[in-house]
C-alpha cells in the first residue's frame, strides 16, 4: 500500500512539472500579456516599464527557472492583472465552484440512480423507454443553450428563480450561530437565497451527468441480473428488494463511481460555460477571464492545481474500488 | 406584468422556505443594482489604467478635474485652474472636502497622490504617464497647488482627469491589496465601497459627507455579468436595474419593450482600419500579392490613391445599419462633433465603388490585387462581421480580399509587430484631438513617446510638425486650430481608414434614469430614480 502511494506521488510530480512547462510555452506562443494589459495610450517608456515589472524582459527559460524556484517555496506567482498571489485568487473562488460541482453531483446521483435502476429492472415498460429517450436529450443539448433557456423560462418568464449570480452567502460557523455570517469561507448552500441562486446552474451542470448515471446504471443492472449469483440468490428465496439493493446494487457501483469521480473532477475544473452564463464567481470564470488576458501566473497555478486534483480523485476512486470489490488488490495492480 | 413576476417570485420563495424565515429581497427605492459586462480588476485607483477600473474608482474617488457626460472638463476637487507662467499651472482646491474616513482634503493629498503614481509595484499599465511631465510640485497653501513642467504643457488639466486623489494620512505605504480588501479605499467620492468580491461584485454605500450633490441611492450593488445574453436576461428578469454594453442584436427588442429604457450617446471610440505604411513603395507587404498569387514587388498601400480607393469602396452606412443595428455613426476622423479636435469639414466619405475603381486604375491597378484583411473577433462590437463585410466590399472593386478574424490575444501581438497589411482595430480617445494624433498618427518614436499605438507605422512630417506645435501651445483656440489642421491632413492622406464611431448604449428598468456617457464609463452616480 505504501509503495503504491509513493509511486503514485512521484508520478504526480512529473505530471505537474510537465504541465507547467507546457503552459509556460503555450502562453508565450499565444501572445504578449503586456500588449493586452497595457492601456492603449501608454508610451514606449511605460511599455518597457510594464514588461520589466511583470518579469517578461527575461528570456523564457530564465522566467521559467524563476517561477520554479518560487514554486518550490510555495509561491506560484502573482497575477499580472490583480497583483495578488495566484494561489490566493484561486482558493478564494474555490468554494463557489466546489459547492456547484457537488450540488450537480448530488442531483445527478439522486435522480440518475433510481431512474437507471428502474429502467434496468423493467427495460420494456413505457416509463423506462421515456427515461432512456430523455437521457439522450441530456447528452445532446449544449450546456450554454440549456443555461440560457433555464434563465429565460424560470427567471424572465416565470420569475421563480434569480437569473444570475451567487446570492447571499454564509460561513459554516456563521450558520451555526457561532460568529457573524460574513466571516470565514462563504457558502451559498447555507442560505435560502443562495440555494435559489444555485438551483439553475447546478441543474444545468447536472443534466449531462444525470443522463450518464442513468445509462451506466441501467446497463449495469441488466448485465448483473443475468449473473449466476443473482439467479442463485433468487432461487434461495431472497426478497426481490434484497436481491436488488444488496446483490445487484453493490456490483453495479464500480463503473458508476469511476465515472462520477472523473465527472466531478471535470466539473470542478471546467464548468466554464455554466459559470459564465450564470455569472457564477467560481474558478471556471477566473480561468477563462485569465486566458482572455493571458494572465500567465493564474493559468499556470490553476492548471497545476487541477492536475493535482485529478490525481487525487483517481487515487480515491482506486481506493474505493478495493472497498467495493474485494477482488481488486491495489498492490498487484501495477498502478 | 412586473408586479406579477414579483408576486410569483415571492410565492415561490415562501414555498421553498417552509419553516424558515424568508428575507424577501425586495426592490427598494433606496437601492439599485447595476450589471456591467467587463470585469473590474482592482479597487486601487492607480494600479491598472483600464476603463472598468476607472468607472468604479470614479464613484469612490474624485479628481482635480472631473469630466461631465459630454466629456468636457468640469471642476472636481479643484474649483479653478490657470496658467501662471507657460511652465506653471496653478490649481485652487475645493475647501471643506472630507475623505470617507473623515480626514480633510488638502494640497498635501494631491502631492502625495502624484508621487504614488509611478511607484505602484507590478502595475501592468500604470498612471505614471500623468505625473511624468511634472518636474516639481509646489504646495503654495493648503488649498493651492502648483505644478511646474519642463516645457509648456497645455494638456495638464486633461491629464488630471485621470488622476484619482487618495488620502495621504491613511495611505502611506498602502499596497494594491490594501485597496482590494477595502482597508485603504478612502476617497472623497459620492459612494464608498463596503464590499468587494473579486470578479463578482462591489457594494457601494452612499457617503453623506460628499461635497457635491448627494448620491441618489443608499446602496448600490455593482455586479459583473460578462455574458451578454445573461446580462440582458438579468435586466428583463428584474434582478438588475441597469446594464451596459447592450449587445446590438438585443437593441431592437429592448426598444420595443416598455419595461426598459435605453440611454445612449455617440462615444469616443473609433473603429478603423490600420494600413501597412512600414514597407516602402518598392517592397512587398506581407499579405498582398498580385492576382496570380505572385509577390507584387511593391506596396500599393503607399499610394494615397489606393488608400483613398479602399476607403471609398466601403459602404459605411450599410455597415452601421445592418451590422451595427444603428449603434454607430459613420466617420472620417477620430472624434465626434462637439469634442475638442473634431474637424467640421471632414464628413464621412461617400460610398463610391466606381470612383474607387477609377482611382485604382489611375494608380496602376486596373485589375486590382489580392489582400488579406485581419481583425479581432472578440474585442469590439461585431468586429468579426465588420471585417467580413469590408472583405466583400473591397472584392467588389477588384481588390480580392481574404479575411481572417482571430481572438484578440493572438491578433494584437501580431498587429504590434507589423505582421499585417491591413487590419481592423479601435481607439477610445481622450476628449482631445491631440490624443489620437500623438498615439496613432504621429511617427513612431521612442524618444518622444509618440506613435506607441501606430501599428501601421504611418508617418507624415507635416502632421508631426503641427502636433509638436500644438503640444506646447498654451492658447486653447490656437491649439485647437493646430490639432484640427493636423487631423485634417492625416485623414485626407488616409493614414488610417476610419469606419465608424460607436454609440454607447445602456438599458435601465422603468423607474430608473441613467445618464449616458461618451467615455463608456458605467458609474454608480449616473443612475437615479426616474422623476415622477
Image (cartoon, coloured by chain):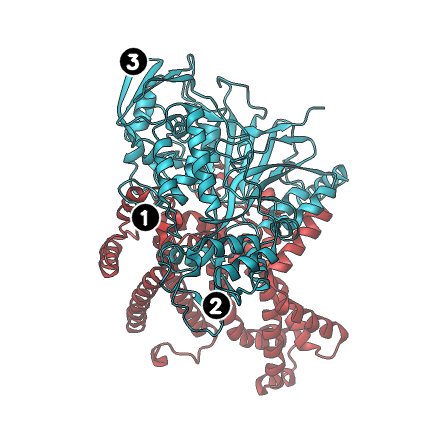
Q: Which residue is mark 1?
A: A78
Residues beneath discs 2 and 3 located on the same chain: no
List the residue tagged with mark 3: B140
Label at residue A262: 2
Is B459 placed above or below B31 here?
Answer: below
- Give the alpha-carbon distance from disc 2 to disc 1, as whole Å: 30 Å
Provide the secondary structure element on which disc 3 rests: strand
Q: Are marks 2 and 1 in contact (CB under 8 Å)?
A: no
Residue B35 at what x, y percent from top left?
57, 40
Q: Quadrant of the N terminus of chain B?
A: top right
Is residue B393 shown above or below B197?
below
Q: Residue at point 57% right, 47% down? A: B349
The red-tinted chain is A
Q: Which shade of the palette goes to chain B?
A: cyan
Element under disc 2 = helix
* Depth order, front residue of B527/B435: B435
Which-is-in-front pick, marks 2 and 1?
1
Instruction: Give the quadrant of residue B256.
Output: top right
Amino acid at each position: 500500500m505504501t509503495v503504491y502511494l509513493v509511486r503514485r506521488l512521484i508520478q504526480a510530480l512529473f505530471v505537474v512539472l510537465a504541465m507547467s512547462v507546457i503552459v509556460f510555452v503555450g502562453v508565450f506562443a499565444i501572445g504578449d500579456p503586456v500588449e493586452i494589459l497595457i492601456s492603449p495610450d501608454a508610451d514606449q517608456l511605460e511599455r518597457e516599464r510594464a514588461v520589466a515589472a511583470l518579469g517578461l524582459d527575461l528570456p523564457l527559460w530564465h522566467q521559467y527557472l524563476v517561477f520554479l524556484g518560487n514554486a518550490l517555496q510555495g509561491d506560484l506567482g502573482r497575477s499580472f492583472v490583480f497583483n495578488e498571489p495566484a494561489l490566493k485568487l484561486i482558493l478564494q473562488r474555490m468554494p463557489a465552484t466546489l459547492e456547484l460541482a457537488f450540488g450537480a453531483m448530488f442531483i445527478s446521483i439522486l435522480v440518475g440512480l433510481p431512474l437507471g435502476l428502474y429502467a434496468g429492472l423493467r427495460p420494456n415498460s413505457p416509463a423506462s423507454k421515456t427515461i432512456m429517450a430523455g437521457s439522450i436529450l441530456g447528452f445532446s443539448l449544449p450546456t450554454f443553450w440549456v443555461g440560457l433557456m433555464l434563465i429565460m423560462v424560470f427567471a424572465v418568464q416565470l420569475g421563480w428563480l434569480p437569473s444570475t449570480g451567487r446570492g447571499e452567502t454564509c460561513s459554516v460557523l456563521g450558520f451555526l450561530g457561532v460568529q457573524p455570517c460574513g466571516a470565514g469561507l462563504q457558502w451559498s448552500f447555507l442560505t435560502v437565497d443562495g440555494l435559489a441562486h444555485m438551483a439553475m446552474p447546478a441543474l444545468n451542470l447536472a443534466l449531462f451527468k444525470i443522463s450518464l448515471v442513468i445509462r451506466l446504471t441501467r446497463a449495469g443492472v441488466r448485465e448483473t441480473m443475468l449473473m449466476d449469483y443473482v439467479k442463485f440468490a433468487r432461487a434461495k428465496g431472497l426478497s426481490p428488494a434484497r436481491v436488488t439493493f444488496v446483490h445487484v446494487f453493490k456490483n453495479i457501483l464500480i463503473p458508476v463511481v469511476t465515472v462520477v469521480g472523473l465527472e466531478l473532477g471535470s466539473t470542478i475544473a471546467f464548468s466554464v460555460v455554466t459559470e459564465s452564463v450564470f455569472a457564477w464567481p467560481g474558478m471556471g470564470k477566473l480561468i477563462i477571464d485569465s486566458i482572455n488576458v493571458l494572465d500567465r501566473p493564474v493559468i499556470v497555478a490553476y492548471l497545476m492545481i487541477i492536475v493535482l486534483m485529478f490525481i487525487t480523485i483517481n487515487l480515491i476512486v482506486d481506493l474505493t474500488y478495493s472497498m467495493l470489490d474485494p477482488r481488486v488488490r491495489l498492490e498487484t495492480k501495477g498502478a | 406584468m412586473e408586479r406579477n413576476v414579483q408576486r410569483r417570485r415571492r410565492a415561490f420563495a415562501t414555498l421553498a422556505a417552509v419553516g424558515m424565515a424568508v428575507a424577501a429581497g425586495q426592490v427598494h427605492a433606496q437601492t439599485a443594482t447595476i450589471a456591467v459586462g467587463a470585469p473590474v480588476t482592482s479597487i486601487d485607483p492607480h494600479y491598472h489604467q483600464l476603463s472598468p477600473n476607472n468607472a468604479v474608482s470614479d464613484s469612490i474617488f474624485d479628481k482635480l478635474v472631473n469630466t461631465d457626460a459630454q466629456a468636457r472638463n468640469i471642476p472636481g476637487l479643484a474649483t479653478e485652474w490657470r496658467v501662471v507662467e507657460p511652465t506653471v499651472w496653478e490649481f485652487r482646491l475645493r475647501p471643506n472636502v472630507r475623505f470617507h474616513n473623515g480626514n480633510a482634503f488638502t494640497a498635501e493629498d494631491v502631492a502625495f497622490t502624484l508621487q504614488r503614481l509611478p511607484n505602484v509595484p507590478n502595475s501592468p499599465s500604470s498612471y505614471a504617464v500623468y505625473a511624468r511631465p511634472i518636474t516639481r510640485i509646489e504646495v503654495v497653501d493648503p488649498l493651492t497647488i502648483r505644478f511646474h513642467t519642463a516645457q509648456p504643457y497645455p494638456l495638464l488639466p486633461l491629464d488630471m482627469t485621470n488622476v484619482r486623489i487618495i488620502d495621504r494620512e491613511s495611505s502611506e505605504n498602502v499596497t494594491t491589496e490594501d485597496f482590494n480588501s477595502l482597508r485603504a479605499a478612502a476617497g472623497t467620492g459620492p459612494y464608498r465601497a463596503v464590499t468587494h468580491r473579486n470578479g463578482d461584485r462591489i457594494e457601494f454605500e452612499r457617503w453623506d459627507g460628499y461635497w457635491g450633490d448627494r448620491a441618489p441611492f443608499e446602496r448600490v450593488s455593482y455586479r459583473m455579468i460578462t455574458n451578454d445574453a445573461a446580462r440582458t436576461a438579468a435586466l428583463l428578469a428584474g434582478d438588475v436595474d441597469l446594464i451596459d454594453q447592450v449587445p446590438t442584436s438585443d437593441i431592437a427588442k429592448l426598444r420595443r419593450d416598455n419595461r426598459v429604457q435605453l440611454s445612449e450617446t455617440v462615444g469616443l471610440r473609433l473603429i478603423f482600419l490600420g494600413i501597412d505604411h512600414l514597407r516602402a513603395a518598392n517592397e512587398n507587404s506581407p499579405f498582398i500579392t498580385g492576382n496570380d498569387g505572385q509577390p507584387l514587388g511593391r506596396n500599393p498601400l503607399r499610394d494615397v490613391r489606393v488608400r483613398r480607393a479602399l476607403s471609398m469602396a466601403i459602404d459605411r452606412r450599410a455597415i452601421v445599419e445592418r451590422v451595427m443595428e444603428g449603434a454607430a455613426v459613420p466617420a472620417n476622423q477620430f472624434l465626434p462633433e462637439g469634442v475638442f479636435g473634431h474637424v467640421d469639414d471632414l464628413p464621412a466619405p461617400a460610398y463610391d465603388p466606381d470612383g474607387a475603381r477609377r482611382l485604382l486604375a489611375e494608380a496602376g491597378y486596373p485589375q486590382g490585387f489580392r489582400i488579406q484583411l485581419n481583425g479581432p473577433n472578440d474585442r469590439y462590437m461585431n468586429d468579426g462581421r465588420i471585417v467580413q463585410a469590408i472583405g466583400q466590399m473591397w472584392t467588389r472593386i477588384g481588390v480580392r480580399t481574404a479575411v481572417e478574424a482571430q481572438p484578440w490575444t493572438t491578433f494584437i501581438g501580431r498587429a504590434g509587430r507589423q505582421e499585417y497589411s491591413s487590419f481592423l482595430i479601435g481607439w477610445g480617445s481622450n476628449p482631445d484631438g491631440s490624443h489620437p494624433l500623438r498615439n496613432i498618427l504621429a511617427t513612431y518614436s521612442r524618444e518622444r513617446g509618440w506613435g506607441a499605438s501606430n501599428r501601421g507605422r504611418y508617418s507624415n512630417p507635416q502632421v508631426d510638425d503641427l502636433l509638436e506645435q500644438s503640444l506646447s501651445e498654451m492658447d486653447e483656440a490656437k491649439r485647437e486650430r493646430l490639432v484640427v489642421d493636423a487631423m485634417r491632413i492625416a485623414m485626407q492622406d488616409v493614414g488610417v481608414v476610419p469606419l465608424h464611431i460607436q454609440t454607447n448604449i445602456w438599458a435601465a428598468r422603468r423607474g430608473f434614469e441613467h445618464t449616458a456617457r461618451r467615455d463608456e464609463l458605467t458609474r454608480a452616480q449616473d443612475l437615479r430614480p426616474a422623476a415622477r
